[in-house]
Structures are given as C-alpha cells and as structure tokens.
Image: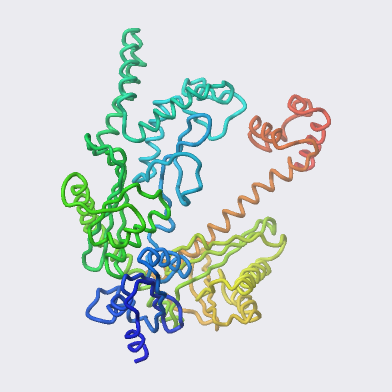
Amino acid sequence: MELKEKLRTLPKKPGVYLHKDKDGTVIYVGKAINLFNRVNSYFRGAHDYKTTKLVSNINDFDYIVTKSEKEALILEYNLIKEYDPKFNIVFKDDKSYPYILLKDCDEPYVSVVRLKKKSRYKGKLYGPFPDVGAARNMVELINKLYPTRKCENLKKDLCLYYHLNQCPGYCKIKIDNETNDSVKEEIMSFLNGDSRNIINDLKKKMNDAVERLDYENAAYYRDLIKDVNETNQKQDVQKNNRETFDVFNYYTEDGYIAITGLFVKNGRLLSSDKFIDYLVSDPENFVSSYIYHFYEINETPKKMYLPEELLKYFNDVYDCSSVRRGYKYQLLKQARTNCIELLRQNKAVITNKENYTESLDDEFKRIFNKPINRIELFDNSHTGGQNTVGAMVVYKNFKPSKKDYRLYKLEESADDLSSMREMLYRRYFRVLKDNLERPDLLIVDGGRIQIDIAKEIIDSLKMEDITIAGLGKDDHHNTSYMMNRDYEIIDIQKDSNLFFFLTNMQDEVHRFAITYHKKLRQKSVYKSVLDDIPGLGPKTRTKLLRKYKSISNLRTLTLEELETVLNRNTAEKLYNKLREENA
C-alpha cells in the first residue's frame, strides 16, 4: 500500500529512478522523460521474464528530478557506475575498443590502441574497428606502404627495420619536418578512405621495376596494390558524398535486444559495433543509454542518424537526425538487418548463459538462505616461504569483476595460515576503514582451519553480515567440497553448474596468485645477483643479459671475459658475487 501511494505522487517530469530490494540495495537505475508514466509502467500489465523478475525484487524506489532529458541521461550513466545495480547491463564496461593512432610526434608512427579514455592518447584516432585483427592488418599495410617509424621508442642505433629498407632510420638519421608532415598527410588520407594517390604511386614503382627487369620488387608492388584494393572492396563507398557520420539502429524479440552501429568516414563505411543481451526497461530507454555509454568511451560523432523515436533523447546532446530515404536511410535499414541476424544467431547462446546464471543464483540462495551477488575468494603462493603473495578475485553476479581483483605482498617466511590471516585482515580492515562494498560471501581456499582464520578476522572487525565458506581439495588437488561457517560439508553434485563455477573460481584465484609470485621470484633472481653490484648500472645489466642471455651463462665466464665488458673493479665484484651464489 505504501508503494502504491508513493507511485501516485511521482512527478510528470524528466528524471532518474532507482529501484531497491528489501535490503535497500539499488538493483536497477533507469531514466525517464516522464517519471510518473515510466515508473508506474513497471507495475502495470504483463512483462517479459527479466522485467518480471526485476519487479518481483522491487521493495521500494527513489527518484531524482532533472531539468532535461540530457541531464537525466548523464545522471543515469553516473549512478549506474556508482551503484553497479544487479539488473543493469553495464554494456561494454570491460571491453575497450581497437583504434588506430597516428601519434603526435615528429616521425610518422601508427599503432593499434585500446581506447578507454578519450583524452589518454595524443594524436589522431581512427576507428573503432570491428576487431583488433582488422586494426592490426591495417597498421601492417600502412607500415608497408609508407616510410613510418616502426619502433615504439627510438633506439640509439639503427635497427633491423632500417637494414631491411622498411624504415628511413629515424633513430640516427634526421628527416626534415616537411617530409614527415607530407607522409602523415598521406597516411591520414589513406585512413580516411582515399587510396588513389598510393595506388598511382605503387603502379609507377611496379612499372619502373618491370623496366629494370626487377621482377621480385615488381611482384611486391603488385601484391601491395592487391592488398589496398581488397581493403577498399571491403568498404562501402558513396562516391558523391564525402560525409562523416554514425548510424545506430536496434531490434527486439522475445525479451532480447540487439543494437548495431555503423561508422562512415568521408563517405566510406569503415567499421561497426554490435551488442546483444536481454532487455530490461523499454527499448528506447535501453538504446539511448547504450549510445550515450558508447560515446563516453569513443570519440563524439560529427553527425548521427537514428530511428525517429530516439531523437528526443539526444537533441541536446549530439547533432542527430532521422531520414526516410537515400543512402543514409539504406544504412539505417542495413543496421536493423544486422540486428535481426545477430539476435537470431545468438539468442540461444544468451538464453543458455541466462539459464546458467539463474541456476547458480538459485543454488547459492538454497545453501546460504540469502541472495549472493558479490563473492570474494582468496589464495596465497610462495616458494619455501620466499616471495610470499596473496590474491583476491571478485565475482559479481557470477561474472569475474577484474577491476576489483587485488594482489598482496605478504610477510616473508610466514606459513600459509599466517599469510591468510595477514591478507584477510588487510583486506577487511580497509573495507571497514574506507566503507568499501562488502561481499555477500567470503570464500577461503581451504577447509576448517582456514575458515577459523576467516571467522577470527571477520568477527574481530564486527562484520558478521559477511557469510564465510571454504573450498577443500582432494588428494589430486581437485576441488572436492565446500564447507560453511559451522564446518558442515555442503553437498554439491560433481556435474552441476555450481561445481564447475566454484572450480573455475578456484583456478582463477590460483592463476592470479601464482602469476604474481612468479613475477616477483624472477625479479628477485636478477636482483640478488646483479642489482647489488656497486657500479653495475641498469644499462650495463641489460647489456650483459642481452649478450649472455642468462645468469647461468654469466656464471661460466672467467674474470678476463667479464673484463671485456666491464671495468676491472666492477668485473671482480660481479665475478666474486656469482661464485658466492653458486656455492
């Protein structure tokens, strides 16, 4: 009754609403042009499965009135970032997009970059590309066509690229700025879809090589012309229109949604972006949120074409419009056709993933009598008590949340139990001190003794709301059982989704810990032998390892052989140190 009364008082204004469960946790954030109509729509009529499940979990809601649709769009994006609600799809938060960067430096230099922040790179960006392979192939072609700098950082000496005639030797040979700028202009033109100049240049070089009877180089230029033409054939081009714009469209079916973006530069269709998932909220709200999120990561469009019903969300945000005929209308239809194909090809895969998640959700609720959304799992690694490290992996809604993973450098020579105690205390003291998000479930990699340590730490910090469990292994080091706080063995079928999920979690935290341990161990090997030698600087250490490949090879050298690389005093110190290490 209180919820119904609250629904009646909602304003008919734009804003953002936050649905909450019985614990007051925000489970969904949405925006609305009319808060009264949008929020009330959740409690009227029939819905698809996902929206029905969302509504069944709503115990309360809150809302924030905004001045405009644009303000609501931006606020929704920021609140999703802040609360990470269970029923919000965070789109491509964990995915960065491949771009080609023409770096802002003296020499022409191109590389593939993963764009996470628009201001991170200095230079001109081209993309996004449909996948990293397409971007790398384009960079490889550019490096063949133009005299670019191949090394990320300039070397002190001429490298192999120079001797293979693939680089003018920027590290040693000064090329005038006018020449470099000319090459950059040609590369920019090529990346914008204009390949006429480079094709004419390659044909001239091929014909000249034929006249000199240099058939090997003639074949090389012929193959380059073929590569450029094939690249052009993969791109749709509007000859009489050199505009740059983006197109987005969508398609829904059976509670799922697919979105496709097409990106046109100088009249040429260069790349696309596709997304598919289940649908919570109405399609217009969903797609507008997706597009806004996309451009928070990617370059803002010069012009955007959308279905008419989406324009109201973006009129104050981007330069956008809709069309009903012509080339741009055909692209809108093409984007929708791509959505239909994407959904029909992948709906079964998405459904299976949803069924998997639902089964895990039900199993954890059955075992622990409460919803489990955030799980933190711990493990440690060392070699004979040296280079001791700990690792924590985090799963949110049964998916790895890698941005929340943590590594711990622990006290040396400590036993496994002391290391676990130190790691858990450091983690949860920090959670308490900084008021960080708490896990619903804490899992230690071990049985009763490790559970006792977890209970000791959690109880001492008065964080009893965190559920504790342990994962035990059999004699073959395979996951064998799960034990709760009261040391009861929890029966798990070996062929169940829950068993495979826990096994994968255990493998992930072990991988994360052992990778960090190996890194420290390798670093300590080099440090113990070379870093403690007075007079042996970083450059000389690098030179030694490049020449002799390993510490083992260095140990076989005589003092006289070391003196060919080092001065006598440093050579003697290193020679004696190597003998001590070998003793």
In this picture, is 376 found above or below 275? Answer: below
- Viewer-nearest residue: 384 or 74: 74
In this picture, is 520 found above or below 213? Answer: below
* Residue located 64% across and 51% down the image: 520
Which residue is situated farthest in the top direction here? 212
Tell me: 70 left or right of 441.
left
Q: Where is residue 473 in the image (x, y as percent from the top left)?
A: 52, 68
Tell me: 392 left or right of 211.
right
What is the basis of the colouring in this image?
A: rainbow
* Residue located 67% across and 55% down the image: 387
- Viewer-nearest residue: 225 or 309: 309
Q: How many labels does the image show?
A: 0
Q: Position of residue 41 (x, y in %)?
A: 27, 78
Quarter residue 102 falls in: top left
- Viewer-nearest residue: 533 or 4: 4
* Residue located 18% across and 47% down the image: 330
- Viewer-nearest residue: 581 or 336: 336
Which residue is situated farthest in the front direction here? 67
Which residue is situated farthest in the bottom direction here? 1
Question: Split into 4 quadrants, where in the image is the C terminus?
Answer: top right
Question: Split into 4 quadrants, where in the image is the N terminus?
Answer: bottom left
Quarter residue 336 falls in: bottom left
Quarter residue 423 falls in: bottom right
Tell me: 513 left or right of 566.
left
Residue 564 seen by the camera = yes
In this picture, is 518 found above or below 223? Answer: below
Which residue is situated farthest in the left direction here? 325
